Image (cartoon, rainbow, N blue to C red):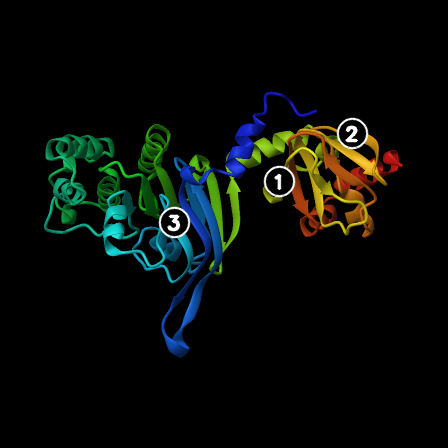
Amino acid sequence: MISQNIDLNQLIAQWHPEPSELSISADDVQHFYGLGEARKQVLFDNDLQIRAGEIVIMTGPSGSGKTTLLTLIGTLRSLQQGSLKIFGRELLHVDQPTVGALRKEIGFIFQSHNLFESLTSYQNVKMAAELVGMDSSRSRTEIERMLTRLGLGHRIHYKPKSLSGGQKQRVAIARGIVHGPKLILADEPTAALDADSGREVVTMFQELAREHRCTILIVTHDNRILDVADRIISMVDGRIRSNVLVQRTAIMCKILQEIPLFQNLPPRVLSQVADKMDLKRFAPGTDIIRQGEIGDEFFVIGKGSVDILIDEKPTTVLQAGEFFGEVSLLKKQPRNATVRARDEVACFVLTDEEFQEIVKASTTFEEELRRVLFERQ
């Protein structure tokens, strides 16, 4: 049985958030540069859902499409193909008034700080506050507080030519977050900062996410800040190759470690299993798999219980923490039984391909599977 102190309802909610909980929702997003024979595709089939209040770190090699996706989300580029919703508003063929309204709710932190050389630190941040209609008395207090916290109290009235690269970057960070946006898009915000300054910046991000439900999407190569991420996304060659919700993976690892089948897996393999698992829910009476069908999924019960039926005759009951579907995948034969939900059931699921990858990667996993098969006969 799975420990009662693991909140499966919270885990299920993370897997299937309500549309109202999403700050970003992307479906089949493609993007191209150039025209005619010079046209080149740079984003391919990207799907993404990010809930309000998440801190998301996006990694990947240079040229992988991270900044392109970031600028599409920020309405700095026009969406060409697919669906992309920010706070529930669709960006495909969006009108300019909607773009203008959205940008007031977004904070931008660029890799190149793009400060106005003729303005002081205070004035650069104040201009951003004015553009979104921030009250002048409130903005004055907030700008001074924020610049001081970022270690620029003695540089508030200095122009960029008198600032170091790291100081300029901290001014740019203050400019991006001074108005309390609902979404912050940051491209390498800590790359030019020392360890202490970088940590202060991500601490501010954590406070905004926790206290104001601000969603923060950071493109970075800075491994020093990975610990603050709720979600880590990896992009390669224009595609989201992995999308790991850190807390979900940690909870899944705890669940799997309580199941004998997974207890002896090395941590690396265990985390790979947790990352690959999907979650599916079934109403009472639903046939999750049917006898005689070709099997293509492996199931671990996270919540509820199921009946195992052979020729429609009940033979046993499986509870949370137990698993089924492995026989068909291992032996490459049709399902030998029907599995029917007795009540509301939530299962963690591996596809056949993912299941076979894990079997090949871990002799311990395969040995344990075969032991269970022997005991069930």
Element at label 3: strand
The image quadrant that residue 149 belongs to is top left
Q: Are marks 3 and 1 in contact (CB under 8 Å)?
A: no
Q: Where is residue 140 in the image (x, y as percent from the top left)?
A: 13, 33
User: Compared to 346, does 186 lie above or below?
Assistant: below
- Give the Cα distance between marks 3 and 1: 24 Å
Q: Position of residue 368 (x, y in %)?
A: 79, 37
Q: Position of residue 48 (x, y in %)?
A: 47, 48
The residue labelled by disc 1 is 280
User: Compared to 48, does 32 lie above or below?
Assistant: below
Residue toward you, 325 or 155: 325
Image quadrant holding the N terminus, namely top right
Q: Can residue 224 be seen in this view?
A: no
User: In the rendered structure, which amino acid carries the disc numbered 1?
Assistant: Lys
Mark 2 Cα within 10 Å, few/some/many (few <14, many 20+)? some
Q: Which of marks 1 and 2 is nearer the N terminus?
A: 1
The residue labelled by disc 2 is 317
In the image: residue 57, left or right of residue 76: right
Element at label 2: strand
In the image: residue 3, left or right of residue 239: right
Q: Where is residue 225 in the image (x, y as percent from the top left)?
A: 41, 39
User: Compared to 128, does 145 lie above or below?
Assistant: above
Q: Is residue 77 visible?
A: yes
Q: What residue do we see at 40% from left, 45% from top?
A: 24
The image quadrant that residue 68 belongs to is bottom left
Number of the label disc, if any, that sits on residue 85: 3
User: In the rendered structure, which amino acid carries the disc numbered 3?
Assistant: Lys
- Give the Cα distance between marks 3 and 2: 43 Å
